[in-house]
Amino acid sequence: MISFENWTNGFLVTLAGQRLLWHSTKRPAVFIHRAGEISTAWRGAGALRATMATVEGARCVFTAGITMLESLASHPGGSTIYSLRFFTTDPQIDALRLVFHDIRGARWGGLGPRETHHVHGKIVLPPEENAVAFALDGRFLQCVSEGIQTFNFTDTRMVIDLKLPASVALGYADSTEAAYELWHTREEWRLPVESGIETLRRDGRAPKSSTFAVGRLGALSFSGADPVSYQRLNREFVGNAQGELSWKIDDMILCQPDIVLPPEYRRELPHANEPGAHSLRARNRYSKLRAGFARYWDACERRWKERGLPALAHPSIMSECGVGFDTRDDLLFSGPDLIFAPNLIRKGELCELALPSGEWVHLWTSRRYYGGKTTVHAPKGNPALFYRAESEYAWLFDSIRQMASRL
């Protein structure tokens, strides 16, 4: 599925039949930066020549003084990992830039490159943190660097800046799930993110709106983030929620598996400012509902630890969701069988959402939905939460509905 083609002054990387990284002296894909120069002083790495080649890969040297090692490894189940490793003996060369050019007709489910990116801007990873991005069809891209990593998304291209030494792994599997398993089970590619991702606007400032924060929550599932990243972000949500928004944050957290929540929210209502018996009733209801989900939450945690499939996921990485979900920030999967809409965009108790194809059961009413746009009543304590009709935990979800009707 992945191939590397050398010619006189350049190379071409093809993934699943689509040209991805294309380098030549006329159209560089690899740039270098020298210490002491201004941040925008990037120059092409020049022409390259192969100095060593084997069945497993090759060693290439650019005329600008940077070395690239390329290798291709096949794994059981038709999975493939193609890696590019970059280093230099020139102490003045301190950073690498890779430019993934546009490919007409390519569809990477939000991974890129694309003719048009719905979200422009920058993602910055601090030093010693790494990320993995997954596409709908089982492809993934992982970058590793000891310094700051910057990902820029613009129309027609995706640009990645990495401190040297650095490496990039391109993977392909038969499905998104298989790609997760490949990344998770091979220790040399599994590099967890220890803290949250800082997502910036074009002007370089961090957005503060809660609507965008939900997008960040879903974006973590693209990144290979570990549970700590989700827990920190959830603390931010709770700390920043004010007024009417606070109960919607509570409902959003009610829908999330234990492993992604700070311990203090797993059985306690995050916001409980109302006085008297009503507050006590709300606390009791929240605690009992979360305890009712415990068996499912445990299954989500095992699935993550054993197979690398995150307990909280953006719908665009679920292959059965189809096209269009990569641009949404109002829907999240809680494990494989629950899906919920945080409902932070609209005021009031009505929630508009678009369900993936298939048969979904509204947890609070048992009403069945068959995908597409819908509007449901989502009052305080009853968020827009649905489960798969064919789920092996359907009996559990139904028992939770019955219990909730009595609380």
Image (spheres, helix red, strand yellow):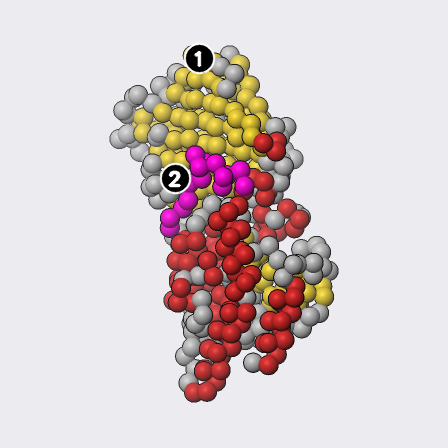
Residue marked by disc 1: 52
Instruction: Determine whether, in the image, residue 192 is placed left or right of residue 175.
Output: left
Residue at image coords 59%, 76%: 403
- What is the magenta segment's predominant secondary structure? loop
Assess disc 2: are there few (<14), some (14-19) or many (≥20) residues with their C-alpha within 10 Å of its C-alpha.
many
Range of the magenta residues? 181-195
Residue at image coords 63%, 37%: 174
Quote the CA–CA distance across marks 2 and 1.
29 Å
The amino acid at mark 2 is Gln
As displayed, is residue 376 above or below residue 356?
below
Q: Quadrant of the C terminus?
A: bottom right
Instruction: Determine whether, in the image, residue 105 is placed left or right of residue 124.
Output: right
Q: Are marks 2 and 1 in contact (CB under 8 Å)?
A: no
Q: Quadrant of the N terminus?
A: top right
Q: What kind of element bears circle 1?
A: strand
Nearer to us in this view, 395 or 49 = 395
**Where residue 250 appears, x then y in whole percent?**
48, 70
**Disc ID at residue 149:** 2
Q: Is residue 308 visible?
A: yes
**Where residue 16 appears, x then y in whole percent?**
62, 30
Whether residue 193 is in magenta: the answer is yes
Whether residue 229 is in magenta: the answer is no
The amino acid at mark 1 is Met
**Disc ID at residue 228:** none
Nearer to us in this view, 152 or 314 = 314
Residue 354 occupies quadrant = bottom right
Residue 208 occupies quadrant = bottom left
